[in-house]
Amino acid sequence: MTGSVDDRTAPALVLQADLPRRGLAYPGAVHEFLRSVWAEPRPPHPPSRARWDWALVGVLAVAAVLEGLLRRDLRSPVVSVVVTAGLLPTLRWRRTRPLPAVGVAFGVCAVTPVLTGHEPELNTLVYLLLLPFSLFRWGSGRAVVLGSLVMSAKLGSSLVLGTTSLADGVAGLVVLSTAATLGAALRFRAGARVRELDRVKLLERERLARDLHDTVAHHVSAMAIRAQAGLATSGSHPEAAADALRVIEAEASRALTEMRAMVRVLRRGEPVDLAPNPRVADLERLADGSAPGPSVDVEIVGDVEDLPPVVGTAAYRLAQESVTNARRHARHASRIGVRVVVDDRAVRLWVTDDGERPALPTAARGHGLIGMAERAGLLGGTCEAGPNPDRGWTVAAVLPRTGGTA
């Protein structure tokens, strides 16, 4: 990247710089912000805590009655107890219907001074702070805006009627804003966690997609090549066709086994058997003489026993995909060489063939090379592929021995 602007802030900076030219000056930007707030959906799946809510209502009802009986400075103890106890059911709606709860509670509190000449007097009424908290935590953007207007109207009416002093009104606004801010903060934190979980799920799906391509596609390619060979020799060498059918059956069984393992992970979250996760030492499998196509020579230099599993599996998958591509695309190839060098810092892989390969534009290279580069990049490594100067094709990959965790 060029320049000194962080990638995360660049879009916002560009938008700010571009606002005057696009006619979206400050008022327009504020309008767009308000529109986005208004259209904000409710957070999904509010928790259901019916027992705790009923217990809270019961405790507060007892506290309201006791406070009404014990306090001697109340001007209208009956009205204060009735209002305080009567608004307790709104706590049961605060998650599922936060706007009606705020509307009822603050509406009643706004009407009470008109009828009695003073505000409800019980300290127990402090539980109403749970309503603005729940409104900003669980309400939609439209509900937050309308509920804020209701609470502001209640404070304004108290100031106009003179039942609340200016100092008390400012203090009440600060307290309500604090409760609302706490709710908004918890909402943002929960949303960030959901987004992080979605990101992890997406990465896992991408990993499974790469594994599906690298494993099942490998077997399907082998079956297709073997079937073509069997068809070509079925007339003159029936025994070759029978051998091809046996290879196809074996490859199909392996492909079905690996697909079922992946489906268990995707559908039921069951753990996959670790056996299908090969390592560098398993690269000798690629040199199986019964596989169709050109022969494969494997050379491993260095100690591979203590490699992290993720690095060993990635190296195997890169080599497997490279060999599959060579068998599929390299025409007239007689040999495929796989060389792995392991040292204290990295695992280096080269896969080379001596075939003739047609030039492939970037857009036509499919998901194989892209997946290989992504797999190496996730571990902090690199993977490049290209034609040799004279003949054939080479895939070169470098994976840090630590798997990108150092």
Image (spheres, helix red, strand yellow):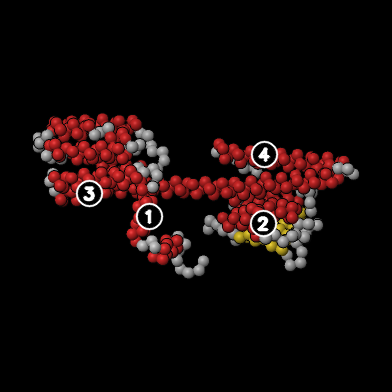
Tag shown at residue 173: 3
Q: Are marks 4 and 2 in contact (CB under 8 Å)?
A: no
Question: Which residue appears at 33% of the width and 59% of the height?
Answer: 27
| Cα–Cα span, label 1 and label 2 | 41 Å
Question: Is residue 26 depicted above or below 105 in this figure?
Answer: below
| First reached walking from the N terminus: tag 1 or tag 4 | 1
Q: Would you name the residue on which mark 4 appears? A: 257
Tag shown at residue 175: none
Q: In the figure, residue 329 lies in which quadrant?
A: bottom right
Rendering coords of residue 324 (x, y %)? 72, 52
| First reached walking from the N terminus: tag 2 or tag 3 | 3
- Which label sits in the foreground, 1 or 2? 1
- Which label sits in the foreground, 4 or 3? 3
Q: In the figure, residue 303 lies in which quadrant?
A: bottom right
Rendering coords of residue 101 (x, y %)? 29, 37
| First reached walking from the N terminus: tag 3 or tag 1 | 1
Amino acid type at circle 2 is Ala
- Which label sits in the foreground, 3 or 1? 1
Q: Would you name the residue on which mark 2 appears? A: 364
Q: Would you name the residue on which mark 1 appears? A: 32
- Which label sits in the foreground, 2 or 3? 2
Q: Are marks 4 and 3 in contact (CB under 8 Å)?
A: no
* In the foreground, 399 or 364: 364
Amino acid type at circle 1 is Glu
Q: Residue furthest bottom?
A: 3
Tag 1 secondary structure = helix
Amino acid type at circle 4 is Thr
| Cα–Cα span, label 4 and label 3 | 64 Å
